[in-house]
Amino acid sequence: MGYTEVRAKKFLGQHFLNNESIAQDIVAALLSKCNSNAIVEIGPGMGVLTKYLIQSKHVLYAIDIDSESVEYLHKKFPNIADKVLLADFLKLDLIKTFGSEFSIIGNFPYNISSQIVFKIIEFRNNIPLMAGMFQKEVAERICAKPGGKDYGVISVITQLFYNTEYLFTVNEDVFTPPPKVKSGVMRMLRKDLIPKVNEELFFKVVKTAFNQRRKKLRNAIQVFGISDALLMENNYADKRAEQLSVDDFIVLTNLIENNGSKIEQ
Protein backbone atom coordinates (compact mmCIF):
# COMPACT_ATOMS: atom_id res chain seq x y z
CA MET A 1 0.00 0.00 0.00
CA GLY A 2 1.60 3.24 -1.11
CA TYR A 3 1.36 6.73 0.21
CA THR A 4 -0.97 7.74 -2.62
CA GLU A 5 -3.89 5.87 -1.05
CA VAL A 6 -4.96 8.79 1.15
CA ARG A 7 -4.83 12.20 -0.43
CA ALA A 8 -3.11 14.80 1.77
CA LYS A 9 -5.53 17.65 2.35
CA LYS A 10 -4.08 21.12 2.64
CA PHE A 11 -6.99 22.48 4.68
CA LEU A 12 -6.28 19.83 7.34
CA GLY A 13 -2.56 20.61 7.33
CA GLN A 14 -1.70 17.02 6.36
CA HIS A 15 1.88 16.05 5.53
CA PHE A 16 2.42 12.28 5.64
CA LEU A 17 5.72 11.11 7.07
CA ASN A 18 7.31 8.55 4.74
CA ASN A 19 10.52 7.73 6.62
CA GLU A 20 10.34 4.50 8.65
CA SER A 21 13.43 5.23 10.73
CA ILE A 22 12.05 8.57 11.92
CA ALA A 23 8.67 6.96 12.62
CA GLN A 24 10.37 4.35 14.80
CA ASP A 25 12.33 7.06 16.63
CA ILE A 26 9.14 9.00 17.44
CA VAL A 27 7.43 5.86 18.74
CA ALA A 28 10.53 4.96 20.78
CA ALA A 29 10.53 8.46 22.30
CA LEU A 30 7.10 7.70 23.74
CA LEU A 31 7.40 4.01 24.60
CA SER A 32 10.71 4.44 26.42
CA LYS A 33 8.92 6.57 29.05
CA CYS A 34 5.37 5.24 28.84
CA ASN A 35 3.72 3.67 31.89
CA SER A 36 0.14 4.35 30.80
CA ASN A 37 -2.16 1.50 29.90
CA ALA A 38 -3.53 3.48 26.95
CA ILE A 39 -1.97 5.52 24.15
CA VAL A 40 -3.87 7.99 22.00
CA GLU A 41 -2.45 8.77 18.55
CA ILE A 42 -3.63 12.07 17.07
CA GLY A 43 -3.72 12.38 13.29
CA PRO A 44 -2.51 8.89 12.32
CA GLY A 45 -2.91 9.58 8.59
CA MET A 46 -1.90 6.32 6.94
CA GLY A 47 -0.53 4.67 10.04
CA VAL A 48 3.23 5.24 9.76
CA LEU A 49 3.41 5.44 13.58
CA THR A 50 0.40 3.21 14.17
CA LYS A 51 2.02 0.06 12.81
CA TYR A 52 4.80 0.33 15.40
CA LEU A 53 2.50 1.36 18.24
CA ILE A 54 0.24 -1.70 17.83
CA GLN A 55 3.25 -3.90 18.52
CA SER A 56 3.44 -2.55 22.08
CA LYS A 57 1.54 -3.86 25.11
CA HIS A 58 -0.56 -0.69 25.36
CA VAL A 59 -4.18 -0.20 24.34
CA LEU A 60 -4.03 2.04 21.27
CA TYR A 61 -6.60 4.59 20.12
CA ALA A 62 -6.16 6.53 16.89
CA ILE A 63 -8.10 9.74 16.29
CA ASP A 64 -8.37 11.48 12.95
CA ILE A 65 -10.63 14.20 11.65
CA ASP A 66 -10.19 12.93 8.07
CA SER A 67 -12.80 10.31 7.12
CA GLU A 68 -10.60 9.06 4.28
CA SER A 69 -7.77 8.31 6.71
CA VAL A 70 -10.10 6.56 9.14
CA GLU A 71 -11.55 4.38 6.39
CA TYR A 72 -8.03 3.51 5.20
CA LEU A 73 -6.89 2.61 8.73
CA HIS A 74 -9.96 0.46 9.36
CA LYS A 75 -8.89 -1.67 6.40
CA LYS A 76 -5.18 -1.60 7.17
CA PHE A 77 -5.51 -2.40 10.89
CA PRO A 78 -8.76 -4.41 11.28
CA ASN A 79 -7.70 -5.64 14.73
CA ILE A 80 -8.02 -2.12 16.18
CA ALA A 81 -10.77 -0.84 13.88
CA ASP A 82 -13.07 -0.22 16.86
CA LYS A 83 -10.44 2.09 18.35
CA VAL A 84 -9.76 4.10 15.19
CA LEU A 85 -12.15 7.01 15.62
CA LEU A 86 -13.36 9.76 13.33
CA ALA A 87 -13.27 12.72 15.71
CA ASP A 88 -11.80 16.12 16.49
CA PHE A 89 -9.38 15.67 19.42
CA LEU A 90 -9.90 19.28 20.49
CA LYS A 91 -13.67 18.74 20.89
CA LEU A 92 -13.59 15.21 22.29
CA ASP A 93 -14.58 14.22 25.83
CA LEU A 94 -11.17 12.72 26.57
CA ILE A 95 -11.90 10.92 29.83
CA LYS A 96 -15.17 9.43 28.59
CA THR A 97 -13.43 8.22 25.43
CA PHE A 98 -10.04 7.05 26.71
CA GLY A 99 -10.36 6.51 30.46
CA SER A 100 -8.61 8.14 33.40
CA GLU A 101 -5.01 7.96 32.14
CA PHE A 102 -3.47 7.88 28.68
CA SER A 103 -0.38 9.12 26.88
CA ILE A 104 -0.41 11.13 23.65
CA ILE A 105 1.57 10.72 20.43
CA GLY A 106 1.28 12.14 16.94
CA ASN A 107 2.60 13.92 13.91
CA PHE A 108 0.47 16.90 14.83
CA PRO A 109 -1.15 19.16 12.24
CA TYR A 110 0.84 22.39 12.48
CA ASN A 111 -2.24 24.60 12.40
CA ILE A 112 -3.60 23.21 15.70
CA SER A 113 -0.44 22.00 17.45
CA SER A 114 -0.41 24.74 20.12
CA GLN A 115 -4.10 24.07 20.83
CA ILE A 116 -3.27 20.38 21.31
CA VAL A 117 -0.60 21.28 23.86
CA PHE A 118 -3.00 23.51 25.81
CA LYS A 119 -5.62 20.74 25.79
CA ILE A 120 -2.98 18.33 27.16
CA ILE A 121 -2.22 20.86 29.90
CA GLU A 122 -5.94 21.16 30.67
CA PHE A 123 -6.08 17.37 31.14
CA ARG A 124 -2.65 17.09 32.80
CA ASN A 125 -4.05 14.95 35.61
CA ASN A 126 -4.95 12.35 32.98
CA ILE A 127 -2.02 12.74 30.58
CA PRO A 128 1.41 11.92 32.07
CA LEU A 129 3.31 11.87 28.78
CA MET A 130 3.32 13.23 25.24
CA ALA A 131 5.78 12.70 22.39
CA GLY A 132 5.22 14.09 18.95
CA MET A 133 6.20 16.12 15.97
CA PHE A 134 5.48 19.82 15.62
CA GLN A 135 6.59 22.65 13.41
CA LYS A 136 10.21 23.12 14.53
CA GLU A 137 9.78 26.63 15.88
CA VAL A 138 6.73 25.59 17.94
CA ALA A 139 8.63 22.66 19.48
CA GLU A 140 11.54 25.00 20.23
CA ARG A 141 9.20 27.51 21.90
CA ILE A 142 7.61 24.88 24.11
CA CYS A 143 11.03 23.62 25.23
CA ALA A 144 12.76 27.03 25.42
CA LYS A 145 14.67 28.13 28.49
CA PRO A 146 14.68 31.68 29.92
CA GLY A 147 16.67 34.38 28.18
CA GLY A 148 15.90 33.87 24.51
CA LYS A 149 13.32 35.12 22.05
CA ASP A 150 11.74 31.63 21.80
CA TYR A 151 10.84 31.70 25.49
CA GLY A 152 7.26 32.83 26.03
CA VAL A 153 3.82 32.07 27.41
CA ILE A 154 3.60 28.50 26.06
CA SER A 155 7.10 27.73 27.40
CA VAL A 156 6.29 28.84 30.95
CA ILE A 157 2.79 27.38 31.21
CA THR A 158 3.85 24.01 29.77
CA GLN A 159 6.95 23.82 31.95
CA LEU A 160 4.94 24.52 35.11
CA PHE A 161 3.46 21.04 34.73
CA TYR A 162 5.79 19.10 32.42
CA ASN A 163 9.49 18.55 31.88
CA THR A 164 10.00 19.31 28.19
CA GLU A 165 12.71 17.96 25.92
CA TYR A 166 13.49 18.82 22.30
CA LEU A 167 14.67 15.53 20.79
CA PHE A 168 15.54 15.97 17.12
CA THR A 169 14.86 17.94 13.94
CA VAL A 170 13.14 16.45 10.89
CA ASN A 171 13.79 17.79 7.39
CA GLU A 172 11.08 18.67 4.88
CA ASP A 173 11.97 15.95 2.36
CA VAL A 174 10.65 13.02 4.42
CA PHE A 175 7.01 14.06 4.01
CA THR A 176 4.42 13.70 1.27
CA PRO A 177 3.81 16.47 0.36
CA PRO A 178 6.85 18.21 1.88
CA PRO A 179 5.98 21.12 4.20
CA LYS A 180 7.66 24.49 3.76
CA VAL A 181 9.27 24.34 7.22
CA LYS A 182 11.35 21.93 9.25
CA SER A 183 9.75 19.84 11.98
CA GLY A 184 10.86 19.09 15.52
CA VAL A 185 10.14 16.07 17.71
CA MET A 186 9.73 16.79 21.41
CA ARG A 187 8.57 15.07 24.56
CA MET A 188 6.62 16.28 27.59
CA LEU A 189 6.82 14.24 30.81
CA ARG A 190 4.56 15.34 33.66
CA LYS A 191 6.38 16.44 36.78
CA ASP A 192 6.08 14.24 39.84
CA LEU A 193 5.56 17.28 42.02
CA ILE A 194 3.67 20.29 40.68
CA PRO A 195 4.55 23.45 42.64
CA LYS A 196 1.71 24.96 44.64
CA VAL A 197 0.51 28.17 43.07
CA ASN A 198 -2.77 29.86 42.25
CA GLU A 199 -2.86 28.56 38.67
CA GLU A 200 -5.48 30.98 37.38
CA LEU A 201 -3.49 33.94 38.67
CA PHE A 202 -0.22 32.37 37.43
CA PHE A 203 -1.61 32.18 33.89
CA LYS A 204 -2.72 35.83 34.07
CA VAL A 205 0.64 37.01 35.37
CA VAL A 206 2.58 35.12 32.69
CA LYS A 207 0.35 36.32 29.85
CA THR A 208 0.38 39.92 31.09
CA ALA A 209 4.16 39.95 31.50
CA PHE A 210 4.82 38.55 28.02
CA ASN A 211 2.15 40.71 26.42
CA GLN A 212 4.56 43.60 26.97
CA ARG A 213 7.77 41.60 26.90
CA ARG A 214 9.93 44.60 25.98
CA LYS A 215 8.89 46.45 29.11
CA LYS A 216 10.47 45.95 32.50
CA LEU A 217 8.21 44.11 34.90
CA ARG A 218 7.61 47.18 37.08
CA ASN A 219 5.68 48.56 34.08
CA ALA A 220 4.44 45.37 32.42
CA ILE A 221 2.55 44.03 35.45
CA GLN A 222 1.55 47.20 37.28
CA VAL A 223 -2.11 46.28 36.64
CA PHE A 224 -1.80 43.75 39.49
CA GLY A 225 -1.16 46.52 42.01
CA ILE A 226 2.08 45.18 43.48
CA SER A 227 4.42 47.82 44.80
CA ASP A 228 7.60 48.78 43.01
CA ALA A 229 9.47 48.44 46.31
CA LEU A 230 8.43 44.81 46.70
CA LEU A 231 9.44 44.03 43.11
CA MET A 232 12.83 45.66 43.72
CA GLU A 233 13.26 43.79 46.98
CA ASN A 234 12.79 40.51 45.11
CA ASN A 235 14.95 41.57 42.16
CA TYR A 236 12.12 41.60 39.60
CA ALA A 237 11.46 45.30 38.99
CA ASP A 238 14.08 45.81 36.28
CA LYS A 239 13.78 42.39 34.67
CA ARG A 240 11.76 41.52 31.59
CA ALA A 241 9.43 38.53 31.28
CA GLU A 242 11.86 36.44 29.24
CA GLN A 243 14.45 36.63 32.04
CA LEU A 244 12.21 34.89 34.58
CA SER A 245 12.27 31.14 35.08
CA VAL A 246 9.14 29.15 35.83
CA ASP A 247 10.12 29.21 39.52
CA ASP A 248 10.47 33.01 39.33
CA PHE A 249 6.96 33.30 37.92
CA ILE A 250 5.69 31.13 40.78
CA VAL A 251 7.37 33.44 43.33
CA LEU A 252 6.04 36.51 41.51
CA THR A 253 2.50 35.09 41.42
CA ASN A 254 2.64 34.37 45.15
CA LEU A 255 3.89 37.92 45.83
CA ILE A 256 1.00 39.36 43.82
CA GLU A 257 -1.53 37.09 45.52
CA ASN A 258 -0.30 38.08 48.99
CA ASN A 259 0.53 41.72 48.38
CA GLY A 260 -1.17 42.94 45.23
CA SER A 261 -4.55 44.47 44.70
CA LYS A 262 -5.79 41.11 43.28
CA ILE A 263 -7.36 43.00 40.41
CA GLU A 264 -9.50 40.89 38.11
CA GLN A 265 -8.09 40.56 34.59
Image: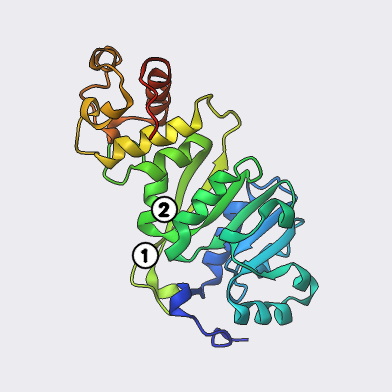
The one of 78 and 32 positioned closer to us in this rendering: 78
* Residue found 72% across the figure and 61% down from its top: 60
Alpha carbon of mark 1 to alpha carbon of mark 2: how far?
A: 11 Å
Q: Quadrant of the N terminus?
A: bottom right
Circle 2 — which element? helix
Residue 139, disc: 2
Circle 1 — which element? loop
Residue behind mark 1? 182
- Extreme residue toward the front, this view: 264
Q: Specify few, some or many for label 2: CA neighbours under 10 Å numbering under 14, 14-19, or 20 or more.
A: many
Query: Residue 220's image quarter?
Result: top left
* Residue found 57% across the figure and 50% down from its top: 130
Amino acid at circle 2: Ala
The tag earlier along the polypeptide, 1 or 2, is 2
The one of 239 and 226 positioned closer to us in this rendering: 226
* Residue found 60% across the figure and 52% down from its top: 30
Left or right, 131 with reference to 114: right
